[in-house]
Image (tube, grey):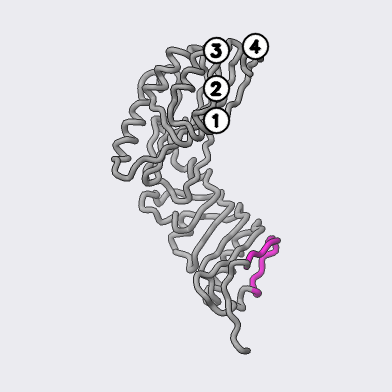
Amino acid sequence: MLAHTPRLKHLSIFTITTNDDNCIASPLSTLIYLRISNFGMRDTWKMISFLQKISNLQHLEIRFMNNIIDGHQWEQIIRNYLPKLKVFHFGMRDKRSADENIQELVDQLIDSFRSSFWIDEHKWFVRCITWNTVIYLQTLFNKFRYDENNFPNSFKSTYPNDDHQEYYNNRTNVTDEALFNPSISSNIRLSNIRHLWITLPINDQFWSFVPSLDQLHSLTVSSYIDTYQSELQALLNRTPHLHILTVKQDALLPLQVSLFKFTNTSICGLDFEKLNYQFNEE
């Protein structure tokens, strides 16, 4: 199809497997903007073959979910095939085996993006975040969706003034267990939470990380019993824009009467569907 679009300037490609042949037979000199999402591709030779044919490219966005290309490889690709590239954004994710030294691998990845090509010539800075054996690598000013519920084990960047708080400002979905990761600095604040899953009673440390719940849209409360009525009501008092409240119980318990005594003027949806309860003879 590309052979029949000789004036094409903007192109977005979504590939799932390496069976799709996205290579082109002749140069596509008009293309200046390209976005590639290779969610299932681990072999990069087809992508490189494709990039060789678009030497006038100025803007490139890449997203990989199962592969990471290091800075040395990208530098070679750009120098050899993309001399006019001005804007380069990427987000790359890969899951490694448990027996690998993840931190050593992260150090190698970050170091591969510290050359003068990245720092001085283009000022393209890179951030690397890990969750156990999962590695995310992204250009610093690129919005990239993280699928992990917990907070990262490590956080490294080639930008000397990279503010970790920016990452936490972008976290909108949080479980309270994630807040107690020892790697999280006590100075971190989560000010834009929209979806929160919390287990009662609330740990005192929770409020040191969460100064405000003004943005909260949905709240899931786990292991609720009547004893926590005042604590949950105090939490609801701090959620002026809460729309959905979900209550769960982990064990078979009597119906908690206090559930019907809470007040919050912004709630428009209650979810008790998975609530376990039993009635006594009364």
Q: CB of mark 3 within 8 Å of CB of mark 4? A: no
Tag 2 residue = 22
Tag 4 residue = 6
Judged from the image, the secondary structure of the residue bearing numbered disc 3 is loop
Tag 1 residue = 15
Q: CB of mark 2 within 8 Å of CB of mark 1? A: yes
Which of the two labelled residues, at mark 3 and mark 4, occupies the earlier sequence position?
Answer: 4
* Percent position of residue 137, x then y: 43, 34
Q: The residue under label 1 is which amino acid type?
A: Thr
Q: CB of mark 2 within 8 Å of CB of mark 3? A: no
Which of the two labelled residues, at mark 1 and mark 3, occupies the earlier sequence position?
Answer: 1
Residue 25 tag number: 3
| Magenta stretch prevailing secondary structure | loop
**Distance of mark 2 from mark 3, alpha carbons?**
10 Å
**Distance of mark 1 from mark 3, alpha carbons?**
18 Å
**Distance of mark 2 from mark 4, alpha carbons?**
16 Å
Q: How many marks?
A: 4
**Distance of mark 2 from mark 1, alpha carbons?**
9 Å
